[in-house]
Structure formats: C-alpha cells, structure tokens
Image (cartoon, rainbow, N blue to C red):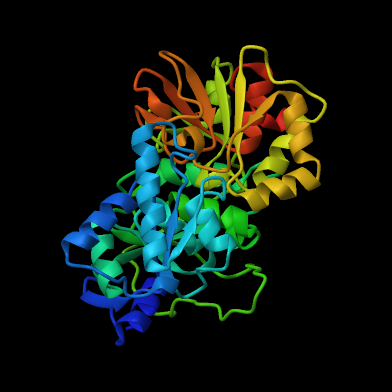
Amino acid sequence: MGQTIIEKIISRHAGRDVHKDEIVIAHVDGVMATDTTAPLAIKAFREMGGERIWSSDKCFLVIDHAAPAPNEGIANLHKMMREFALEQGCTLFESGEGICHQLIMEKGIVRPGHLFVGADSHTCTYGALGAFGTGVGSTELGGILLTGKIWLRVPNTVKIELKGTVPSGVQAKDIILYVLGRIGIAGATYQAIEFCGEAIAGLSLAGRMVMANMAVEMGAKAGFVHHEGLRLPYRFRPIAPDRDAFYHQTVTMDLSRMTPMVSLPHSPQNAVPVDEVEGEKIHCGFIGTCTNGRLEDLNAAAIVLKDRKVHRNVRLLIAPASRQIFLAALRDGTVEILTKAGGIFLPCSCGPCVGTHNGVLGDDEIAISTANRNFKGRMGNPRAKVFLASPTTVAASAIEGKIVNPLSYA
C-alpha cells in the first residue's frame, strides 16, 4: 500500500516504513516552546532528572504570548527562560522578535520533510512548506528535550481538494473559514489534512500558512499543503503522496463562487458569507497573530485603508508577526498608511489574541479579528464577542464601524 505525506515523513524519522494507526518512536528535527509552555516544560525536564538537553542547536524558546511582560509573575517566567537558554546554549527569541511559528519558518529553522514539535497547538503551521509540525503538552516536550524523540500514533489522513478559480477579493483566510464551516471543529480529530487542488496551487507561502495553521481548528494533528506552486528561497525536494495512498476521507469543494467569509461567535466553525452579518456593530478590529500577521496581510489592509480613516468608535490594533515583517512594512510605506488611518501598532507578538494584555476587550464589546480562534473568553473577556475574518474584511469594517463586505473597497 502506498503512503500519504505524513506517513512518508514519519517513516523517515522512525527508520522504517509506517502506516496509519501504528505506534512509533521517531527522532525530531527540532523543538520549540513559548512563554506559556516553556516554564512548565523546563520544570518537567528537571523533574525527569534532566541536566543537559539532547541538542542545544535544535531547541528554540520564544517569548511572544505575553511580550513584553505585563506583570511581575510573567516577568519571572521570562527570566526563567532566559536563564535556561543561557545554561543550555539553546536559542532564545526575545520579546519583540516575533511570534514563534513565524520565526521558526522565517529563519529557515524548519524545512520541507522535517518532523518538528512545538508546545503550542498551532505548530501545524509548518505544514505550509511540507513539514510535519505538531503541538504537544509541556510535560511531553520536557521528555523530548531530554531524548530528542517522540512517540506517536500515525494519523489517518483526510484529503481536502479545493477546485476552481478563487474569485478576486477572496483571501486564504476566507478559504479556510469556508472549509471549517464544512468540516467542523471536530471533523478531523487526530488526523492529518492534505490540502490540494488548483485553488491551493496559486497560494503564496503566507496563504499556505493560513491554511496549515487552522488545520488544528478542525481537530487535526497536522496540516499539509501540497507543494505544487510553492516557492521557497532555497532548493528543496517536493514530497507527494503515492497514488495508491489510503485516505480516511476525501472532501472536494468548488471555490469558484465563494465570497468573503466570517466566523460568528463563539466558534471558528460558525462560518458564513460576510453578507449574512453585514451591519453588525464593532468596537475593535485586530490584524495580526500567527495566522494573519504577515506582510501580505498588512499590505492587503493598507490597500483598503489608504487615504481613509478608522471609524471614531473603533480601535484598530495591528501586531506584525515578526520584526522582519514590521521593518518590511516600514520600508514599503504600509506602516505609514495604517498609522495615518488610525491603526495602533503593537509589539511583534501574539498581542490580544491570547487575551493577556495589549488589547483585552471590555464587557459586551465586539471585535473582528484575523486570529484563528474566537471561543468564549478569547481576547481576554468571556462577556465579549469575537468574529473571525480576513485582513481586508477587518480593515473595511474598521472604517465603517460595522462588519461590511470588503469587495466594495477592492
């Protein structure tokens, strides 16, 4: 029997051919933890008797979720990470460097075919370039720090074939919300997703990152975007599934007539065309996160906001996914356009997505965000509501003070 992409990658790291449902022990190419998970992973590592991590070159710590520290307690967790990185000789990305998943890809740390583990659920983002990236708990990461190995069950794979020419003005975020509306938040639990089809082949790396990033919102263990059309700044060997590979399910969708989408509170799966909620009043717009904080996203918002102003009753928060992205947006004039429009730039971090600081919502406030989750309590307040949308939809809505279809601003 042939193999899926995930079966091929796991086979290379397990040292033998494997197929779905097998339990394997595999070597990892790297590990990552953030300020929400690294302190617990470090504690677990110590409790297991760890003195030296298995490889200082393959361990990366990132201060991004509450960056810079909003209080004394978090400041001390950051201090623990700095001291551990210095002791072990591993890489630490400081506050302001950027969001973990952006940095791991931006710095060329993860490559096609890698098996990379992160103590963050959106590690599946690395499937954008054909790596098996998956999230684990802090205790498990502590064990991987010690051994450089992970045990796992080889997931089944769901193939999602996206056909048709994507209409003008529809972005990758609209596509993944549309898919989520079909599959649901539990529709691919502990399975891998392979995104393929003509609609995928035309996506940029940034767009592919959106698709892979939100695979976990369907319960998936990993998300892969087929290599067709992918361009990277280095040579790589494409990975493709075998023709006789087994798929648990194949879902085909035609995107040729789709329109911009939004997800209603309080679940990403509540995806509807934006026209169905047009006119909903908002208090806050947020552009950023590991899903949509890249230069392509900021540029899209700037096209909408050029020579326009954010509504007087709306605050528009913007958090670039990395310092490198912010500098690029500074050079090309995007930062100036967004700032003149009334946008508020935050540190290059997760920002208000997690809800710890930098834009917590008030009671009964409504936000429209480019984040990946809008569960109750997201953005820091269970009595607020969060809609999910693309950067252009967020920008257009921020202008009018209500949710609108961005196609009128194209």
**Quadrant showing the N terminus:** bottom left
Question: For the C terminus, which image quadrant?
Answer: top right
In the rendered structure, the answer to whether residue 73 lies left or right of residue 234 reads: left
- Residue at horizontal 68%, vertical 45%? 326
Q: Residue 110 at x, y = what percent?
A: 50, 68
Confirm whether residue 253 shows in the render: no
Residue drawn at x 23%, y 62% as measured from the top left: 45
Q: Quadrant of residue 103?
A: bottom right
Q: Is residue 204 rendered to the left or right of residue 283? A: right
Image point (65%, 44%), residue name: 297
Q: Decide which of 375, 56 is in the foreground and name it.
A: 56
79 or 182, which lies in front? 79
Give x and y (percent) for residue 255. Answer: 58, 48
Q: How many marks?
A: 0
Q: Position of residue 383 (x, y in %)?
A: 36, 17
Q: Where residue 98 sits: x, y (%)?
A: 55, 49
Residue 65 shows in the view: yes
Which picture quadrant has residue 30?
bottom left
Q: Nearer the viewer, residue 129 or 109?
A: 109
